[in-house]
Image (cartoon, rainbow, N blue to C red):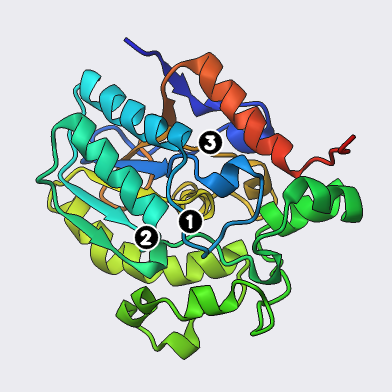
Amino acid sequence: MAATRDASSGTSAGNRCSLSLAPVSMSKHTLFLLRHGEGAWNKENRFCSWVDQRLSEAGVKEAQDCGRLLKEHGHRVDVVFTSILSRSVQTAWLVMEAMGLEWVPVFKSWRLNERHYGALIGLNRAEMALNHGEERVKVWRRSYDVTPPPIDESHPYFAEIYGDRRYLTCDIPKEELPRAESLKEVLDRLLPYWNDVIVPEMKRGKTVLISAHGNSCRALLKHLEGISDADIADVTLPTGVPVLLELDDSMRPLKQRQLLGDPAKIQAAIKKVEDQGKATVNN
């Protein structure tokens, strides 16, 4: 049976939890956060953002392995929330299939979408680090309140994103959808959905799985754990690794978050994500 990795053994300050733990006598609510399995552009180290991509072959296996892990450890899921991007939805389907829970309801919202990287969409992170410096790329990727340059109609992926009819299903007019976002802005558009839709399900005693994206999951973790604006830059979530959170009635952590799975594999996956923003020279 796979081991369970506590996030406090991570490689950087942001991957260590220093929390004020709530009294153990309070009610416990269980939440699983899951960054979707690897997509084609994850593999190519490009900013995918709101461009719709399906899972790679490795990403399919990550999602299936996640479902099997949760089932083997006796975890249940009562309701699932995803973004409206295919890689998030596909991951949820594969996890539920592996758990034998295909009947569990799945709800989708653009408010769980990945961070909108604006004009950076489609660009290679390592090449950008070579051209602009690793620290600048880290600010674009991981900072809390820095918004990248916005996308405009001349961008090669503008029409593909804003011409997609899935965005007609949003709870705001398509014209009001973001053109670029900081992590802070991701949290701002995510919190109403968390508070008004997801939290009531948890308070009914349901175990929730959120199958979303690196930045929407990081933004929610920042809110739940009270991570500082500076420290959130060092919080890394690898693809396909479930994060277990046990929360009290105020939706604050009762204990440290746990990244579930083989510790060595999780450590390697975290390093892989952190290395994506480092400069590489093509020979």
Q: Is residue 271 above or below residue 224?
A: above
Q: Which amino acid lies under the numbered mark 2 shown in the image of this protein?
A: Ser
* Residue drawn 38% across the image and 51% down it: 88
Q: Residue furthest front?
A: 283
Dot 1 or dot 3: first in sequence order is: 1
| Distance between the alpha carbons at the discs numbered 3 and 2 | 17 Å
Q: Quadrant of the C terminus?
A: top right
Q: Quadrant of the N terminus?
A: top left
Q: Which mark is residue 216?
A: 1
- Residue to which mark 2 is pinned: 83
Indicate the position of residue 74 as horizontal and vertical percent values.
19, 22
| Distance between the alpha carbons at the discs numbered 1 and 3 | 13 Å
Q: Quadrant of residue 270?
A: top right
CB of mark 2 within 8 Å of CB of mark 1? yes
Asked whether residue 251 appears in the rendered view, the answer is: no
* Callout 1 secondary element: helix
> What crowding class fits label 2: few (fewer than 14 Cα within 10 Å), some (14-19), or many (20 or more)?
many
Q: Nearer the viewer, residue 277 or 234?
A: 277
- Residue to which mark 3 is pinned: 238
- Drawn side of residue 38 relative to residue 193, left or right: right
> What crowding class fits label 1: few (fewer than 14 Cα within 10 Å), some (14-19), or many (20 or more)?
many
Indicate the position of residue 15 as horizontal and vertical percent values.
59, 34
Q: Is residue 32 above or below residue 216?
A: above
* Callout 3 secondary element: loop
